[in-house]
Image (spheres, rainbow, N blue to C red):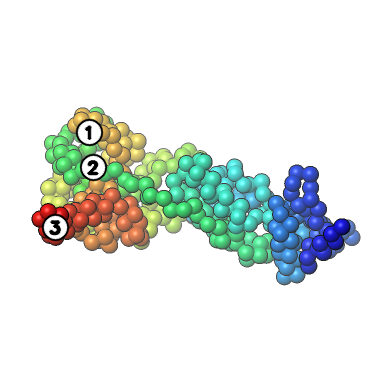
Amino acid sequence: MPRAKRRAHGEGSIFLRSDGRYSAVISLGVSPDGRRIRRTVYGRTQAEVVTELLRLRGADAAGLDVRADRSTLGGYLASWLDLHEGSVRVTTMRAYRRRADIITRHIGALRLVDLDADDITSFLKRLVQREGLALLTVRDIRALLCQALEPAVEKGKLARNPASMSKLPAQGDPREVEPLTEEQTRTVLAALRTMKPSRTGVPLGPLFSVILTAGLRKGEARGLTAGALDLETSTLRIRTQLQDYSDDEAEAVRAMKRQPEEFVRWVSDRCALVKVKSAAGKRDLVLLPYVVEMLRPLVEGRPPDALVFTMADGSPVPERGVGSAWSRILRELGMPHKRVHDARHGAGSLLIEQGVDNKVVAAVLGHSDPSMTQRVYLHVRRKGMEQAAEAMARAIKPPAGD
């Protein structure tokens, strides 16, 4: 009969459970009331259990709080979010909570001290392969976890940040934008020159001409003020944008003793003028002469802080109204549906097709990272590569008969 294999150092009493997993119990000292503190460790293999036992012993020896902390990742994230309420933009907190909801729904029940990089890697992979989330969204979710778990490391709740050691799913093809073609852009711009205001008084021609030719975001275009445009130099200074709030968010902002740092002023009950989010978003653009002339009657003689684009009653242009007006324009011109954001991307695509440097395009569009511009406009780069290959084929003519 073969001799039983001796347990390796650190294995202790490891048992094979009826569900196929291995488990072991580790003693972590005595509680203040004299009771012995034990924790049960589980794993798919003996090696996993041994690794976790050694980790817990090392963490305990280092003075980390691994004895009585039974808090879950979901509970920890909820506390972390509450702690940061009011210290970041309302829209940033909205995005944080949306990402935290996804995390909590999938792995929120895991105990914080049991969380490891493999758990997070599997979770991120599942989001892409089963949930169909875009890789950029999954990156943002992982970034939130990295940020939220760092204080747990600093306070001794975790030995290391498992999120920072996790891996993102394999990079697939970037989600390509579908901007207007050069011909479509010319057709739309021609129609915008003579377009009348909407039924609510919104000057649609100038609004979309600025977005198409200068690559503005919707919020930036809606938040343009008369003082941002220098008619003499045709310069447009982008410093602010309009931000919409829900009723609860608006109430929370108004209740703050000090307004958020980015806040400029309210323009309606649920809409405020705020500073652009990043340093790259602050930029000075040179407008086309005919676009300046379209804007001139909307700017001349008005106070510097007056919104350039409003409805007939002076109220700000609703974000949804911009989208629906844009869809109607394309429909009337017989064009396929495109988002307003695709119009902004159209400006970037045209600049790249004309050979403008990637860094310059990034500056025009307000991208903080030029590599982002390169990823977004990959389709334009690919078209350029195809044209380069065709040019090379013309230059190197094969011998007759080949």
**From the viewer's perspective, is 201 left or right of 64?**
left
Give how far across and how far down residue 389 sits, in percent: 20, 56
- Which quarter of the rendered picture does the C terminus lie within? bottom left
Q: Amino acid at mark 3?
A: Pro
Residue at image coords 71%, 54% = 45
Q: How many marks?
A: 3
The secondary element bearing badge 1 is classed as loop
Q: Which mark is residue 398?
A: 3
Residue 307, quarter of the rendered image:
top left
Q: Tell me which numbered mark, 1 or 3, is placed earlier along the sequence.
A: 1
Sooner in the amino-acid sequence: mark 1 or mark 2: 2
Q: Is residue 313 left or right of residue 246?
A: left
Residue matched to label 1: 335
Pick the front one: 208 or 356: 356
Mark 1 vs mark 2, CA separation in Å: 9 Å
Q: Where is residue 84? Give x, y as percent.
A: 55, 54
